[in-house]
Image (spheres, rainbow, N blue to C red):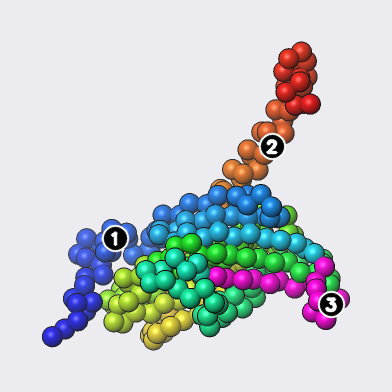
């Protein structure tokens, strides 16, 4: 008897996926900037069911001293999944997957940061997965990039990320968990520096034909740039609100009388 998954129609005759999206459509994304008051920079990101919190600390002196590099700063990226982020309680101890994702994501961020500006320093980037449904590493990396900008870390570009892949013979952007579990599933998380389209993260699980690979890279860059637009929009909104708040203070003070006392 064939498995239930093999009978699923991952894209129907109307071109719609199981959740109603088109093949090149990413799940709804919501980004908020500056949500952790004690961090230098922070971001909360929702990507479909995924919920991510990212916080940046530093640059600050690298300790212990033997990890210091006199030529550049060290990026310490920590990706962790909360015990309640998956259907079955996860062991709070970091697993192999979390260690691997922390390493490759940190290297992707290093490609975007002017590390040479901060010798002997560390930049700590902490991301916590609060809820997950496939694609958490690209969602976390996108959130971390926004948090770095919020922290004022000098960067040559922001890192934007998106997953692409294959399910049921169809090439798709931003696979969800059901699509990732397809019998022929291929999952490709990727991240780019959007101004140059330099790929800074690229992994693959599965097999593809050369033509499919070329199409998915193009689809991935398109998905990354959709995320980039939302990252920019969230950052502009945060700083527009900050500027508005600053501009109101002297204006109200200038009124004198009762209003002036509110800001003293």
Tell me the CA gap for discs 3 and 1. Answer: 51 Å
Left or right of 171: which side holds 158? Answer: right
Q: Residue at x 47, y 59 (%)?
A: 51
Q: Which type of secondary structure does the marked residue at label 3 adopt?
A: helix
Residues at marks 2 and 1 touching, judged by CB atoms closer than 8 Å: no
Magenta stretch: give its range: 61-80
Q: Going from the N terminus, do you reach mark 2 or mark 1 first?
A: 1
Residue 123 visible in the picture: yes
Residue 148 magenta-drawn? no
Indicate the position of residue 204 as horizontal and vertical percent values: 46, 81
Q: Nearer the viewer, residue 166 or 95?
A: 95
Q: What percent of the width, then of the height, locates residue 213?
A: 43, 80
For the point 55% across and 70% down, which residue is it? 80
Q: Position of residue 205 (x, y in %)?
A: 43, 83
Residue 239 against residue 85 in the figure, above or below: above
| Other-residue count near label 3 (Cα within 10 Å), few / some / many at <14 / 14–19 / ≥20 | few
Provide the residue designation for mark 3: 65
User: What residue is drawn where x is 41% and y is 77%?
Assistant: 187
Q: Which mark is residue 19?
A: 1
Relative to residue 236, is residue 84 depicted above or below? below
| Residue of label 2 | 243
């Amino acid at each position: 008897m064939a498995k239930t998954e093999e009978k699923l129609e991952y894209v129907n005759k109307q071109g719609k996926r199981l959740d109603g999206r088109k093949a090149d459509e990413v799940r709804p994304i919501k980004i908020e900037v500056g949500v952790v008051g004690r961090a230098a920079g922070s971001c909360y990101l929702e990507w479909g069911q995924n919920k991510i919190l990212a916080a940046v600390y530093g640059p600050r002196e690298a300790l212990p001293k033997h990890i210091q590099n006199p030529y550049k700063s060290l990026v310490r990226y920590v990706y962790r999944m909360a015990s309640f982020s998956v259907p079955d309680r996860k062991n709070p101890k970091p697993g192999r997957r979390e260690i691997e994702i922390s390493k490759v994501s940190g290297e992707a961020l290093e490609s975007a940061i002017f590390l040479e500006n901060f010798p002997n320093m560390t930049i700590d980037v902490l991301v916590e997965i609060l809820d997950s449904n496939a694609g958490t590493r690209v969602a976390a990396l996108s959130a971390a990039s926004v948090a770095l900008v919020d922290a004022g870390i000098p960067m040559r570009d922001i890192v934007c990320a998106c997953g692409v892949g294959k399910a049921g013979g169809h090439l798709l952007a931003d696979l969800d968990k059901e699509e990732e579990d397809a019998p022929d599933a291929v999952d490709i998380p990727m991240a780019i520096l959007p101004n140059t389209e330099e790929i800074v993260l690229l992994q693959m699980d599965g097999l593809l034909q050369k033509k499919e690979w070329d199409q998915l890279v193009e689809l991935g860059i398109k998905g990354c740039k959709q995320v980039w637009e939302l990252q920019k929009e969230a950052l502009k909104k945060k700083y527009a609100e900050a500027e508005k708040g600053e501009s109101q203070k002297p204006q109200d003070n200038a009124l004198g009388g009762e209003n002036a006392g509110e800001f003293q």
